[in-house]
Structures are given as structure tokens and as C-alpha cells.
Amino acid sequence: MNRDPGRQPERTLLAWHRTGWATLVPALLCLRRWLHGGEPLYAVSAFLLLTLGVAMLCGLLRRQSVVSLLIASSGVLLLVGIVVRL
């Protein structure tokens, strides 16, 4: 019996591309904040998110744990930057 996977692989690929595009928006916002404020934590966060977004759009990254780690680490960096300024 042949198994028909249907459109599941196509939907999965589209979901990864959406996630890649979605990481580029906060990356560009961090980059903009770094250019205007000069805070290095924004530069590091922008670099992490830009690298992640481009890797996902190019199909180089498909591991959920790595994606979660990079997004969480950029969020922690931004949180540290906010706490240090207070």
C-alpha cells in the first residue's frame, strides 16, 4: 500500500518560511535601535535574529531546538539590556 503524504511537507516548509520572515522583523527593529542608540546588546540580538531568519529562509535550519534557543537567547539579551538601563 502506497502512503500519500498529501500536502503536509508543503505546509511544513511554508511554516518554516513564515517563521523565518517573522524573525527578520524584530531583527531589523533591533538593528535600527542599535544604529540610533549605539547599544551593543541590540547589535548582538540583531545579528542572532538576522542569522536565524536568513538560515531558515535558505533552508539551512530546520531544528526546532536550535531555533528556540536562538530566539530565547536574543530575548534574554534584550531583557538584560533593559534591566541594566534601569
Image: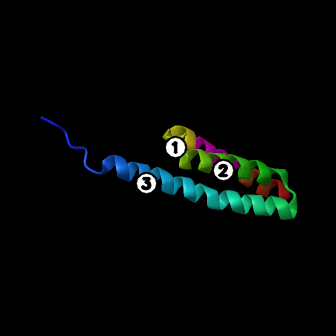
Distance from the alpha carbon under mark 3 to that under mark 2: 19 Å
The mark found on residue 25 in the picture is none
Q: Identify whether 19 is placed above or below 70.
A: below
| Cα distance between the residues tagged 3 and 1 | 11 Å
The quadrant of the picture occupied by the N terminus is top left
Distance from Cα at disc 1 to Cα at disc 2: 15 Å
Q: Secondary structure at mark 1?
A: loop
Q: Earlier in the sequence, mark 3 or mark 2?
A: 3
Q: Is residue 55 above or below residue 1?
A: below
Which residue does the image show at 55% across and 46% down from the upper left?
58
The answer to whether residue 51 is seen in the rendering is yes
Comparing marks 3 and 2, which lies closer to the viewer?
3
Q: What's the amino acid at mark 2? A: Leu
Earlier in the chain: of badge 3 and badge 1, it is 3
Q: Which residue is mark 3?
A: 14
User: Which residue corresponds to mark 1?
Assistant: 59
In this rendering, would 35 be left or right of 25? right
Q: Is residue 9 left or right of residue 82?
A: left
What's the amino acid at mark 3?
Answer: Leu
19 left or right of 14 in image: right
For mark 2, what is the residue? 49
Q: Nearer the viewer, mark 1 or mark 2?
A: 1
Q: Position of residue 80 (x, y in %)?
A: 76, 51
Q: Is residue 74 magenta?
A: yes
